[in-house]
Image (tube, grey):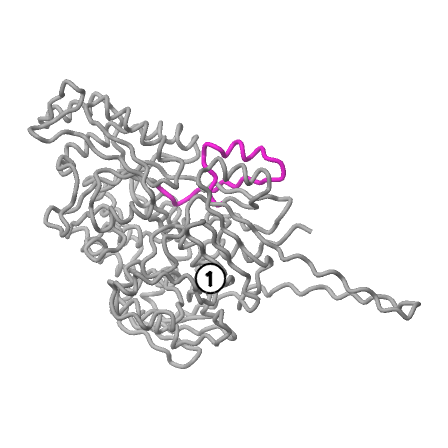
Amino acid sequence: MSNRRLSVYLLVLLSLILAACTGGTATTAPEGASAPQPETTTAPESESATEPEAAPPSEPSVLRIGWLGKPDTLNPAYAFLTESYVIFDLVYGTLTTESIEGQYIGNLASEWSHSEDGLVWTFNLRDGVKWHDGSDFTADQMAWAINAVMNDPDGWAALSNYVSGFSEVKAVDPQTLQITLEAPIGNMDYRLSFLFAVYPKDFESFSTPEDLQNFSNDAIIGTGAFKMNTFDKDKGVLILDANPDFYLGAPKVDQLIFQTFDNADAMVQALKVGDVDMVNEVPSSAFETVKGFEDVKAVQQPGRYFAEMIINSVPDDHDPVPTRNPALKDPQVRLALATAMNKQDLVQIVLQDLGSPGTTLVPPTLGGGFWHNPIQDISFNLDQADQILEDAGYVMGSDGVRSKGDVRLEFRLQFPSDNPLYPRAADLLTDWYSQVGIKTTPESVDPDSLVAATTPTGDYDLVLWGWGPDPDPDFILSVMTSDQFVDGGWSDSGYMNPEYDQLYLDQQVAVDRDERQRIIWQMQEMVFNDRPYIILWYEDILQAYRTDRFTGFKESTLGIEISLSLTQVEPVK
């Protein structure tokens, strides 16, 4: 899970939303920086007749990146984990992308415009873009990639939401793409930043959603700044080579090596001794220590990532039938779970105060706070939680666990094994819950297994996990829609609410910013009260890199691992 893409920026989006109503606006993307040209030095005339010795070839520059996870798949049709999207950003291209400053700028598109009614969008592609195999990139290939998602939403489950409301996509000529909409879309350029230009030859042979989703895509061909070299999932090693023909300028390092570590301590130690040059995610417990490392810079930015406790909300008539403790269907049990949770302690103890207590699934960093509903959270009160359960008929047993009839308040509390924060959080929750008669059993689970258990199987009780929402709230709101569970998409809670589903569709076509905010706030309140998720905290982004090895990292809320940063990183001279 967790497409950890990123945060704050709605000021630019406002003008684009309004433009969708007024029409006729053309947007020109700034040109990317060209690759630096080496200086040319002319040697003085030699007084002897001997030829000067050739300079020894320089060693290739390799940036080694440590992280605790790894991609679940390199197939964007069905990728769920954050690490997959980090790689997609580096190897694939999209029509638009989010800049370091939070604006949407051109990527594969050099400029674009839309009709007066906001229904027809025209994109001019950059000249000279090539696939990693050296062939030319054309508008009909981009049209094929978007149409593939439109024509097979079940197969392209991870991306299908981004084409909602698209009616036709076609190439006008080799350099011009046209997209026609069913109704104006206020966040069009955001949507396009997640529709990857996949290589048609890699994907066009699949005839069923199952065949498509079983495709590993380990030999990715894209148009991005880096090319696929090796992905050894068992060893946790992924290697990318620089693309010298990248249309925005060749990267300044020759190779990226992503190394998965089994635990955070080993990863942090590797950074300290120089076995890795950058850490994608510094554990909050180690951040102060990392700040003291010689020749290492620790980077802290407000983030979009949040952690939540998922409560199994899969309907009883779902196929397969959910496997869970039936007490979780009781709203009073859910209320007690929220009331017996001390979020301030979670932030102070688990995050070391490097974050803030969470309330809704739209973080405060989205749109500078515009999209976040400042709901009053439920106060931590063990006595009140105990009384809620008593009043609901759950009787305390001699073993300290409450029950009602044959139903005991005993739940699995699972979390992914690749995150060092969740074990401590699970221990704290288990202690608080035990004081009100709820027994939880913490269990660390491989992330792939946890994805399989939650989406769309529903074989769990409670799960600690997290999301990194997109810049616009549309994606994270979509996670709670019925379609995203029925079709095997992003939903891990199984929450299904027709009223919420309709509000989601309404916000997609609301081009008035204030009206869209009203709908989005209502959706957040609905999820808050129904509690398919209880949001635990909002995390700061914590990363680090060795300043004695590399320079040029672009520090922002987007993180230093994005393509716009890693293409500018170069060895220290």
Residue 272 in the image, given as x and y percentages of width and height:
57, 37
Q: Quadrant of residue 411?
A: top left
Does the stretch in magenta take in 385? Answer: no
Does the stretch in magenta take in 296? Answer: yes
Q: Is residue 449 visible?
A: yes
User: Residue farthest to the top?
Assistant: 398
Nearer the observer, 110 or 283: 283
Q: Residues within 10 Å of mark 1 (few under 14, many from 20)?
A: many
Nearer the observer, 355 or 46: 46
Locate residue 453 relative to residue 566 in the image: left or right. left
Nearer the observer, 253 or 563: 253
For the image, the number of numbered tags is: 1
Locate residue 476 relative to residue 290 in the image: left or right. left
Locate residue 444 relative to residue 411 in the image: left or right. right
Q: Residue at x 29, y 63 (%)?
A: 156
Q: Is residue 8 visible?
A: no
Residue 9 in the image, given as x and y percentages of width and height:
41, 52
Q: Amino acid at mark 1?
A: Val
Residue 328 in the image, given as x and y percentages of width and height:
16, 37
From which residue to which does the magenta span run?
A: 280-306
User: Residue farthest to the bottom?
Assistant: 173
Residue under circle 1? 91
Residue 189 in the image, given as x and y percentages of width and height:
38, 63
Q: Residue at x 59, y 57 (%)?
A: 253
Q: Residue at x 30, y 50 (%)?
A: 476
User: Residue farthest to the right?
Assistant: 47
Nearer the observer, 373 or 500: 500
User: Residue farthest to the left?
Assistant: 405
Q: Residue at x 22, y 51 (%)?
A: 456
